[in-house]
Amino acid sequence: MSESERCFARASRLDRSWGPAALALAEIYLNSDRPTDAVDVLDLAIRHGCIDPNVVWQAGLGAFRLQMWMRSISYFQLFRQLNSTQPFTQYYTALALCHLEKYQEAIDAIEIEVKINPGIAFAAHSIKCLSYARLSKKKAAESEIDICLNYSFASIQGLNVSGMSKAAERIRQAANLLGDEARSDKIVERAFKAGIVSNEFFSEQRALNKTREEVDLCLYEVSLNQELSKDWKDDINCPPWEVNWQSYRVNWLVLAPTQEQAEAMAMAYQKTCATIDAKCLSTERLDDKVLRGQEWGVVDHSPRDPKINA
């Protein structure tokens, strides 16, 4: 135990409801890879009467990250009593409700979120389309999917790469639940162009394309340089962070028998992302281990790294 941890733990014991000590101790736990302890110390403060909004908010986020869905919802409910206009409170609540398969409640929560946080509309539509699909409300789900498919990505606010990727994955899942291959293919196409394809998609593709027999596989990182067309900023698929980019670098992680096959697969996927051919900068084998398996292909890709004025 570090001296700072001892200090704040002592302060917390002296007054369990004191928010600053709970927050400081929680941060120490997070920095030492103890996220459950971080949530527990915040929870202890709340149960002893702490009404510091920061304590309640961090408890909600921490529980959400740990997939403690019911606990996160209870923290966010308390937080709304303390600050009813804070953006993203109902957004996280809606996502937690989806995980609990309470889809109508998720729809109700995200509709409240949009009223105070209009910039979250794209994510809200993605939550609603999946919820409607889970509720077997086909027409409502199709309507929400179509709204998402017609969105200009550059206009989306409040979501980072991960948030947009998860939203696109919800749309794909909704289309798949409806058995709508055309809509599913469309959101996948748009996700590739925007660089927000989910890990779930790649996992499914590897499973679909598995070989009949096991082969020796290695993990490769293929680094590509992608020049962008001059009108990319006006493209419906351009995400908000790329509107001023002229090019970017991206690393594709590929599980393949050989380096050549890894490069070929990375280049093939990258071709779906842009109209200009990419250039291969380097390929590195990441692990000395050789795996035996049937499922090989792309594992993931890194966030794009801009090369402004390159």
Image: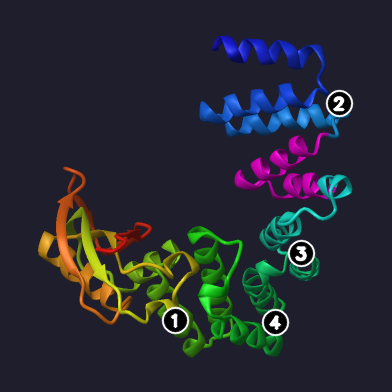
* Outermost residue to the front: 309
Is disc 4 placed on a helix, strand or loop?
A: loop
The answer to whether mark 3 and mark 1 are in CB contact below 8 A is: no
Q: Nearer the viewer, residue 154 or 17?
A: 154
Q: Which amino acid lies under the numbered mark 2 shown in the image of this protein?
A: His
Q: Quadrant of residue 296?
A: bottom left
Residue 300 falls inside the magenta stretch: no
In three-dimensional space, the C-alpha distance between marks 3 and 1, rounded to whole angstroms, equals 29 Å
Q: Residues within 10 Å of mark 4 (few under 14, many from 20)?
A: few
Q: Amino acid at mark 4?
A: Ser
| Residue tagged 4 | 136
- Left or right: 156 with respect to 113? left
The answer to whether any part of residue 184 appears in the image is yes
Q: Earlier in the sequence, mark 1 or mark 2?
A: 2
Extent of the magenta region: 52-77
Mark 3 lies on residue: 113
The front one of 155 and 272 is: 155
* Marked residue nearer the N-terminal end (4 or 2): 2
Q: Colour scheme in the image?
A: rainbow
